[in-house]
Amino acid sequence: MTLKGLFTELTFRYASFPSTNLTGEQLVPIFLQALLRIETCGFHVTSIKLDGCSVNKKFYKIIADNTRNIKHKFQNPLSSEKRDVFLFSDPPHLIKTVRNGLANPKRNMHFKGRSTSWDFVKQLYEMTITNTGLTTLPKIRHEHIFLTNFSKMRVDLAAHTVSTTVAKAMRHFLTEEAEETANFIEKFDWLNVTNYQECY
């Protein structure tokens, strides 16, 4: 568990928990105890970020507001102002999940009512290397496009592929049919932010 400042460079490793044999139910009191201690020190917890493992997903379901379809927040039980705490999956896992979903041929993904397809990403890559032998996408290589079980786990490959650079190249080199795939990919480049202060 790491404490990070939203508008400061504060980073403090508060605690580590072995999660191999931990359940979502067991994580709730551990988290609430940590929340109590952190809030007692004068910090205001506004969000928590966890990866997508099954224990964390179960934790989200238990702790989140059950009146909502999407479990994205809960009311801080220690806050007199009834402050909400928002739940987030960490961006690296989200980016990998999006890329892997897009690359899975069994998925029939749509964005704004139009089909999105990994085939457009492949087509773009093959078009650029066929014409010149070099890709016009400097960070995109064979391993970015033709995924293996190992490459599916690499965040860097996902971040390079699900990027504004790829979206712009799609719009330039491919037909209008690829537009919604480009729009979809471009949305996830927004997750590629390391610190609020670097943006403003």
Image (cartoon, helix red, strand yellow):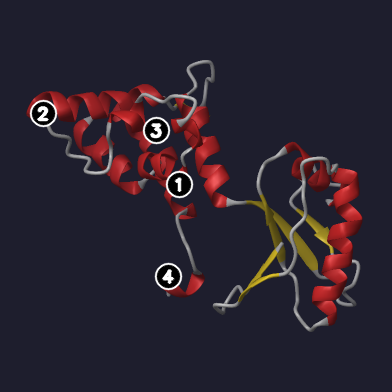
Residue at the outermost left position: 132
Residue at the outermost top position: 106
- The disc, 1 or 3, on the residue closer to the chain's N-terminal end is 3
- The disc, 3 or 2, on the residue closer to the chain's N-terminal end is 2
From the viewer's perspective, tell me whether residue 4 is left or right of residue 64.
left
From the viewer's perspective, tell me whether residue 199 is left or right of residue 175.
right
Q: Position of residue 174 (x, y in %)?
A: 24, 29
Quadrant showing the C terminus: bottom left
Label 2: element kind: loop
Residue 175, quarter of picture: top left
Separation (CA) of disc 3 from disc 4: 26 Å
The disc at residue 199 is 4
Separation (CA) of disc 3 from disc 2: 25 Å
Label 3: element kind: helix
- Amino acid beneath label 2: Gly
Q: Which residue is mark 2?
A: 133
Q: Nearer the viewer, residue 95 or 51?
A: 51
The reply to whether dot 2 and dot 4 touch (C-beta < 8 Å) is no
- The disc, 4 or 1, on the residue closer to the chain's N-terminal end is 1
- Neighbour class for label 3 at 10 Å: few (<14), some, many (≥20)? many
**Count of labels shown?**
4
- The disc, 2 or 4, on the residue closer to the chain's N-terminal end is 2
